[in-house]
Amino acid sequence: MKAFKQTLLGKKTVTLSLLVLTAGPALGARHYIDPPDNGVYYACVAEGTQIVLANGTSASIQSIRIGARVTAQANEQYHLASTRARTSPAFVSANVVRTYASRNDQQAYEVRDDKQHRLIGTDDHPIVTRNRGVVTLSALHVGDVLISDTGPSRVTRIAKVQYTGKVYNLLLGTSSGNAKANTYTHTYFANGILVGDMKLQVTLQDKQD
């Protein structure tokens, strides 16, 4: 994981067991694959999870390619600065700069809220809450306030589930039409619930270390 963080945050060049299947055009570039037993840890969401795109439509996470644009949060400070309740944040368009796919060998969790959203992901996937900031999926509590695509919602269920399918994640980069948000757009809506991308996972783990 240390080597991965150094590569992701641009601190130095290292070699990882990540394979680029094809360079391809931007919208057609394939996923980076995590081969088994390489020791690199990813927090991801289940195959079939619907991601809200910048144009308001949705697409399954496994169909999203480099160059696609998704709806992201505009200001990172909203969920990293404090845990006080806040007003709804603004959202912008963010570019997908890398996608990840892996077989799931981690404990999966299911979260449901009072607005009929349901999400399955790995235990350490970052989830944005309004009352506790960014927490891992496994650390959610019933009653936590999420940010959903239909407004604030409350967690009604969080439980371990059996899931052995593929899992996916995104790395988001420069936002379009909002230069100030370039480094802050590291969230996206997964099945209607605001979650973190790969960089936010690293940020959260650094804060916990």
Image: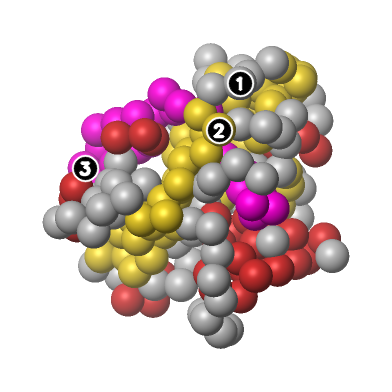
Q: The disc labelled 2 sits on which kind of residue?
A: Arg
At 30% from the left and 35% from the top, the residue drawn is: 63
**What numbered label is drawn on residue 40?**
none
Q: What element carries label 1?
A: loop
Asked whether disc 3 touches disc 1, contact meaning CB atoms under 8 Å apart, the reply is no
Which label lies toward us, 3 or 1?
A: 1
Quadrant location of residue 130? top right
Q: What type is the residue that disc 3 sits on? A: Asn
Where residue 51 sits: x, y (%)?
Answer: 38, 35
- Relative horizontal placement of residue 67, taking residue 130 as reference (left or right): left
Label pair 3/2, CB-CB below 8 angstroms:
no
Q: Residue at x 36, y 47 (%)?
A: 31
In this rendered view, identify the residue nearer to me: 122 or 30: 30
- When the figure is inspected, residue 63 is found, relative to residue 161, above or below; the finding is below
Residue range in magenta is 38-60
- Residue drawn at point x = 77 percent, y = 34 percent: 138
46 magenta-colored: yes
Q: Residue at x 25, y 33 (%)?
A: 57
Question: Visible in this render: residue 3?
Answer: yes
Q: Name the residue under label 3.
A: 55
Rendering quarter of residue 143: top right
The residue type indicated by label 1 comes to Thr
In the rendered image, which residue does mark 2 sit on? 103
Report if the CB atoms under discs 2 and 1 are less than 8 Å apart.
yes
Report the Cα–Cα distance between label 3 and label 1: 32 Å
